[in-house]
Image (cartoon, grey):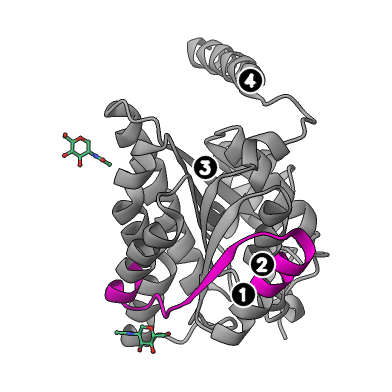
Amino acid sequence: MGNVKVSVAFLLAAVFCQLLLLPSPTKDLTDDVNGLRVVITGASSGIGEELTYQLAAMGATIVITARTEYKLRQVANKCKDLYGADVFPIAADLASFENASLVVSEGLNKLGGMDLLILNHFGDVEFGGYQHDPLNFQNALVVNMMSHAHIASRSVQALSQSKGRIVAVSSAVGFLGSPFMITYATAKSALNGFFTSLRHELTFNQSDVSVTLCHLGYIDTKSAERIKDNLILKPSSKKNCASEIVKSSMNRMSEMYFPAYFSWVHVFKTLFPSVMERAVQLLYKNV
Ligand SMILES: *[C@@H]1O[C@H](CO)[C@@H](O)[C@H](O)[C@H]1NC(C)=O
Ligand SMILES: *[C@@H]1O[C@H](CO)[C@@H](O)[C@H](O)[C@H]1NC(C)=O
């Protein structure tokens, strides 16, 4: 009985604190974003590309990176034509730490500092039934998790000087787990651990750098199409997703969920793990 009382009290206190921390709902963020120096990884397509357009439209100067140079140029040119924004492409394969370091140093050169780092890239993961290949698994974790940790670490000093922000784009499968994308879910789970702990340590060190961890659901991007045959869910809009990411980082929120109901999914997963696992299974089908 005592445990129940403690649990209920704890739950109410947590809900109350969370409500206090919610950002004001609709505020125009143009003034906050205007003039920011931003680095976005994985910006040649999908959510990264959409983030680039939205931030460019609000007056940010941006370094974008991905593997494919001509796609990056297209994104940069579009930002110039539509918004007169300065967007600098740096083509790099982030599977190498050396290249990841270069992105940070060249980015800092081009921008003269950094206010916002958005780690959004992923690659080299196979979807579908899990086939264990140790080398593929190791490489996938480098691209999808360790390179994020590396780029963030190399940027912390510049971000401290500007009271900057880090955004790490993770996925709901990082806390839920998922069939048919085991490697991806593993990398996202590790991202959650790294960036939650980095935030703790930065706070402990009284740093002004904020870390926003984004737990995304199923979004209508090209990469997500690869899993569509295995899912009965409808994808959510990448435009809305990108604008929620911008909003959460400007408000320096610790965690962000999109679609928003995933925050409840996270709560239920914690409270009733086996029920949630059964429920999540219903969203998948075998092909
Ligand atoms: C660094 O990136 C470039 C451009 O994508 C690529 O050609 C090169 O092989 C990469 N270097 C390493 C060590 O992976
Ligand atoms: C926090 O401070 C300690 C002690 O100065 C330092 O060694 C560590 O690198 C700092 N952590 C981060 C994430 O900057």
Disc tally is 4
- Cα separation between marks 4 and 2: 35 Å
Label number found at residue 44: 1
Number of other residues with Cα within 10 Å of mark 4, as a class: few under 14, some 14 to 19, many 20 or more: few
* Residue range of the region highlighted in magenta in the rendering: 76-100
Q: Residue at x 31, y 25 (%)?
A: 206
| Three-letter amino acid code of the residue under disc 4 | Val
| Three-letter amino acid code of the residue under disc 2 | Glu
Identify the element where label 4 is drawn: helix
Q: Is residue 263 above or below residue 148?
A: above
Number of other residues with Cα within 10 Å of mark 3, as a class: few under 14, some 14 to 19, many 20 or more: many
Closer to the eye: label 4 or 1: 1
Number of other residues with Cα within 10 Å of mark 2, as a class: few under 14, some 14 to 19, many 20 or more: many
Mark 4 = which residue?
15
Disc 1 Cβ-to-ligand 1 distance below 8 Å: no
Is residue 147 in view?
yes
Mark with earlier residue (3, 4): 4
Query: Toward which corner of the image does residue 79 lie, by quadrant?
Result: bottom right
- Asked whether the residues under the numbered discs 4 and 1 touch, taking CB atoms below 8 Å apart as contact, a structural biologist would say no
- Cα separation between marks 1 and 2: 5 Å
- Cα separation between marks 4 and 1: 38 Å
Left or right: where 278 falls relative to 96: right
Mark with earlier residue (1, 2): 1
Query: At which x and y percent is residue 152?
Result: 37, 54
Number of other residues with Cα within 10 Å of mark 1, as a class: few under 14, some 14 to 19, many 20 or more: many
Identify the element where label 2 is drawn: helix
Mark with earlier residue (4, 2): 4
- Asked whether the residues under the numbered discs 1 and 2 touch, taking CB atoms below 8 Å apart as contact, a structural biologist would say yes
Mark 3 = which residue?
212
